Amino acid sequence: MKFRYLPMTEQDQKQMMDTIGIKELEELFQDIPKEIRYDGRLNIEEALDETKLVKEMTRLAETNINVKQYMSFLGAGVYEHYIPSVVNHMLLRSEFYTAYTPYQPEISQGELQAIFEFQTMISELTGMDIANSSMYDGPTALAEAAMMSAGQTKKKTILVSKTVHPESREVLKSNAKGQNLHVVEIDEKDGVTDVEDLSAKYNEDTACVIVQYPNFLGNLEDLAAIEKIAHQGKGLFVVSSNPLSLGVLKPPGEFGADVVVGDVQPFGIPTQLGGPHCGYFAVTKKLMRKVPGRLVGQTTDVNGKRGFVLTLQAREQHIRRDKATSNICSNQALNALGASIAMAAIGKRGVKDMATQNIQKAHYAKNKLKEKGVEIVYDQPFFNEFVVRLPKPIEEVNKELLNHKILGGFDLSRHYSDKENMMLIAVTELRTKEEIDEFASVLGGIK
């Protein structure tokens, strides 16, 4: 074969050409005028055989900096957490790894039950009645929550805090533009949502209020105060939340949230260059028929045996488009399964212990940095991220940290014009006391 990675043989090609009645491949392009065809040779390298290609790809991969070789204090939405080894052992089983849409429940019981367990665990973590089978990622879930809110309330204004992840807000704005919705951002004050600004901007056209908990700056929002404003009219209260933090924090459902969304990346999904991820979407019972994506329900068959099926399917393939709640047509079943396996393996007490370690180690890091003379920007309760101000641009600081095999925090000036020289630092349960001490010593010594 001329091309190593194409399954077509020369005999296959000849048979196809004979069938359509051509002698040369060039005849396939005869309808394209010669003057606009490229008549040269593309400036690309020659194809490699398999052995050489594997060596070349390995060489390229080794030029990357990764969390196995460097200690990481980078979070901002993607976190390095403990992943039980059983996760990959289960995910790579062919029954799950090759599974697609479970339209035929009689042959998809394993996948359907796995999704059902995911929904159950998300509902328990968030304090909500119902969760769907997953979304593409956290930002997609947040945008879908806003679209659903607008459809439910028949209102056009989306109020979103500036302490919500900047990339999530961009996804929201893109979705809102297509739906002719108006996105209004609420100011941040002292690292949390400015409740007074929220109250001033809330009006009778408000479809929902969106906040993040813990927020993008790491701090805990006053959900009780925000809920009162969100529900003073007919608007819905949407909370984006790190699911691991809910192992110790009071869940949004207990604060009266109508919708809780987020990304389950902290459970069983590695950092892997930013994706793929897996979003979750949980609601109160009154909104269950408006949930985008899929729901898996439990039932019994004709013999009374427990079984699982797709239920309440209000997706655009199944009903008239003008009645559809969303154009989301799929989910992240494999990553949702990974998250389910991780949560099951870690266990209820383990999730609490893991979340507690995040809090304790992050606060230890904050205190060590303070001892080394690093300025802590906010005096707010936080989970596993906090903000510091440094004497020089964060881009320069992170280059210096790389010399010590440290992945520094996130440069907030990339998204906030008023946060020059500010770094968002994440500390997870994987960071040791020795690593935190070294990080504090190096960062404190940068002038």
Image (cartoon, rainbow, N blue to C red):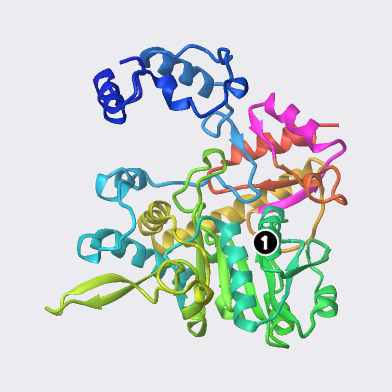
Q: Is residue 243 above or below residue 27?
A: below
Tell which of 58 and 311 is nearer to you.
311
Q: How many marks?
A: 1
Residue 19 x %, y %: 27, 29
Q: Is residue 382 above or below residue 197?
A: above
Residue 250 x %, y %: 57, 73
Residue 160, magenta (yes or no): no
Q: Is residue 6 above or below residue 256?
A: above
Residue 304 x %, y %: 15, 80
Q: Residue at x 27, y 25 (%)?
A: 18
Q: Which residues are magenta?
A: 385-408
Answer few, some or many: residues within 10 Å of disc 1's Cα (few below 14, many 20 plus, some between 14 and 19): many
Quadrant where the image shows the N terminus: top left
Residue 58 x %, y %: 46, 20
Residue 387, magenta (yes or no): yes
Q: Residue furthest left?
A: 303
Q: Residue at x 75, y 66 (%)?
A: 161
Q: Residue at x 37, y 14 (%)?
A: 51
Check disc 1 and give the amino acid type.
Leu
Q: Give the left or right position of residue 304, taking residue 409 as reference.
A: left
Q: Residue at x 64, y 40 (%)?
A: 436
Tell which of 119 and 365 is nearer to you.
119
Question: Which residue is identified by label 1?
Answer: 172
Task: State which quadrant residue 420 falls in.
Answer: top right
